[in-house]
Image (cartoon, rainbow, N blue to C red):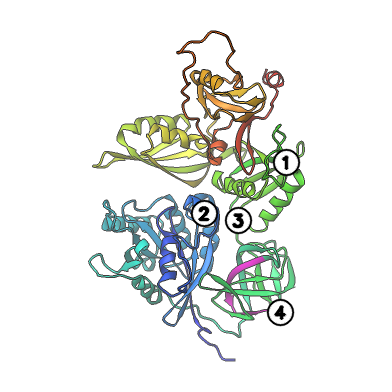
Amino acid sequence: MKEVKNMEKIINIAVVAHVDAGKSTLVDALLEQNNVFDEHTTLVDCIMDNNDLERERGITIYSKNCAIRYKDYKINIVDTPGHADFSSEVERVIRTVDTVVLIVDSSEGPMPQTRFVLKKALEQNLRPILFINKIDKKDARPQAVVDMTFDLFMELNATDEQLDFPIIYGIAREGIAKLSLDEESNSIAPLLDTIINHVEPFKGSVNDPLQLQVSSLDYDSFIGRLGIGRINKGVIKTGQTVSLVRNDGSISSFRVTKLFVEEGINRVEKDVAYFGDIVTFAGCSDISIGDTVCEKDVIDALPPINIEVPTMSMNFLVNNSPFAGLDKKSKFLTNRHIKERLEKELETNVGLLVEELPDSDGFKVSGRGELHLSVLIENMRREGYELSVSKPEVLFEEKDGKKYEPFEKVIVNCPSDYQGTVINDLQERHATLEVVSLNDEGYAHLEFSAPIRGLIGYRSAFITNTHGEGIMVRSFEGYKPYVGELTTRKNGVLVSMENGKTLGYSLYNLQDRGTLIVEPATDVYTGMIVGIHNRDNDLNVNPCKNKEMSNTRSKSSDEAIALVPAKTFTLEEALEFINDDEYVEVTPSSIRLRKSILDPNERYRHNR
């Protein structure tokens, strides 16, 4: 069979950007304007963010594939996460595409994650397309942002060819793209035309031996683990027996039982798929990221993909509180249940590491950051799991006999009135101030390099200190020398020393002691945390004490008591808040804070 350019013209693109720059919104526009949906489909914003957590938080957590057809091209689109905790997904995906559409906010300019994704794209010799989004914002400065992005390309040692990048201006939410700011446009077509003019379709031959590297994993309860990757050479067929070269160099074989490609937002089963296409396939129960699928007995392996190592760990423990199992929605309580769920997560979540704890019922779970791990915990509680979780701990590295720890780049934009407080707070946490500037609107722009240990628990203090007007963005920077001991939380806690229901009378009298985190008529147990102490020590209190009854009546004594509304914690806030001797108790219906040792006398003896 003679060589052909392609069975169909295929271009693979990844949409990359910092958090909230408009990736998923742009993908929506590409899908809607290319007739992917029929008239009966109910359209929602960020349709590719189909996970409940993604919708609630407004972020992309998992990279996803879709495909559109434009003119005589098939364009496979990968919508990638923007949060730093999921950066390993972006790194792998970029290996499977022909170009990236780099989205930059027209007022914010390049952000930390913008640098990361662009660096990875340039390292793969891709020629990015720049999309300046949200040009309708009041503070938009598109030309200045283009210049800033060009400077970023220069800093990252882009080649002359990469520096000659196309620029598109647009409003992704309205599905508008244009080649210049003064051009009239009401569609996304200028972006699609730029893609097909800028990128050649994938070339190859059906006679080439198969070569496909796994870049992502998925799982189906009926057909098992699924491998996802681009076909670099040749074709792959259902029923074909292929060789598998693992990251460690070992070779085995398996039979392809199912084969899928993307059409619109749907996964469509196929008998054969050709070079250039991104496919999903089944047949190997232990396939992993970086493995290369080759023609039977024709070994042509690609370099292995290095998965980024975890930077943070938590202990997932069986819940042993007095309220264990009382939640009506709880279905899975035991160590075996937790183990099975974590093993299932490892099928697809390759950035995760799970180790059994030798001295207790539980597991040490390591991941890329607080968000990475808290998303797993939140998914588990929604599925009916109940567990206790310890304080996040960073993972250190040893190099040449010296201790190193993970650092993050922290960018803060806040009113200049609060910059002194922010700088002081972060420097107390051993952060180094690297950039400070003021704009005409009275806002300060601050850039820090900070140890992740020091940032645990800081977000709530940051919101308080900037009165909710500050914006803080973090991204992983790398490992640097250990900075020594840190003090983070400055307040102790109010700990219940009774079992029962909280009473308004008792809580009213405790308000002077600190900030309450429980409402009246809340069930509590000995060792459960009910408030934040005003001082730096822990205080045992009785939140269930009732007013003593007497025959004396007075108007003042019988007036209704006024309670300050209790502070409520989200899961992330609770994980950030707790100390080393505390747990977050997670059930499908509740998030409670507790001491790891519940009995106050035993806790006293332990702390002596």
Q: Which residue is mark 2?
A: 54
Residue holding disc 4:
239
Q: Position of residue 457 (x, y in %)?
A: 51, 35
Query: Could you tell me the amino acid type at mark 3?
Result: Ile
* Contact check, label 2 and label 1, Cβ < 8 Å: no
Q: Main secondary structure of the magenta part?
A: strand
Observer-nearest residue: 31 or 283?
A: 31
Residue 244 seen in the figure: yes
* Image location (x, y in percent) of residue 335: 75, 44
Q: Is residue 179 above or below residue 518?
A: below
Residue topped by disc 1 = 362
The answer to which image quadrant residue 502 occupies is top right
- Label 1's element? strand
Where residue 170 appears, as percent x and y from the top left, is: 32, 63
- 420 in the magenta segment: no
Kind of element beneath mark 2:
helix
Front: mark 3 or 4: 4
Proximity of marks 2 and 4: CB atoms separated by less than 8 Å: no
In the picture, the quarter occupied by the N terminus is bottom right
Instruction: Kindly check if marks 4 and 1 are in contact, taking CB atoms under 8 A apart as contact.
Output: no
Mark 2 vs mark 4, CA separation in Å: 36 Å
Residue linked to disc 3: 307
Left or right: where does residue 281 sit relative to residue 455? right
Q: CA distance from mark 3 to mark 1?
A: 25 Å
Looking at the image, is mark 2 or mark 1 earlier in the sequence? 2
Which residue, as the protein is rendered here, is positioned at the far top? Answer: 552
598 to the left or right of 412: right
How far apart marks 2 and 1 lie (CA) works out to 28 Å
**Of callouts 3 and 4, which one flags the residue occurring earlier in the amino acid sequence?**
4
Amino acid type of the residue tagged 2 in the rendering: Glu
Asked whether residue 535 appears in the rendered view, the answer is no
Badge 1: residue crowd in 10 Å (few <14, some 14–19, many ≥20): many
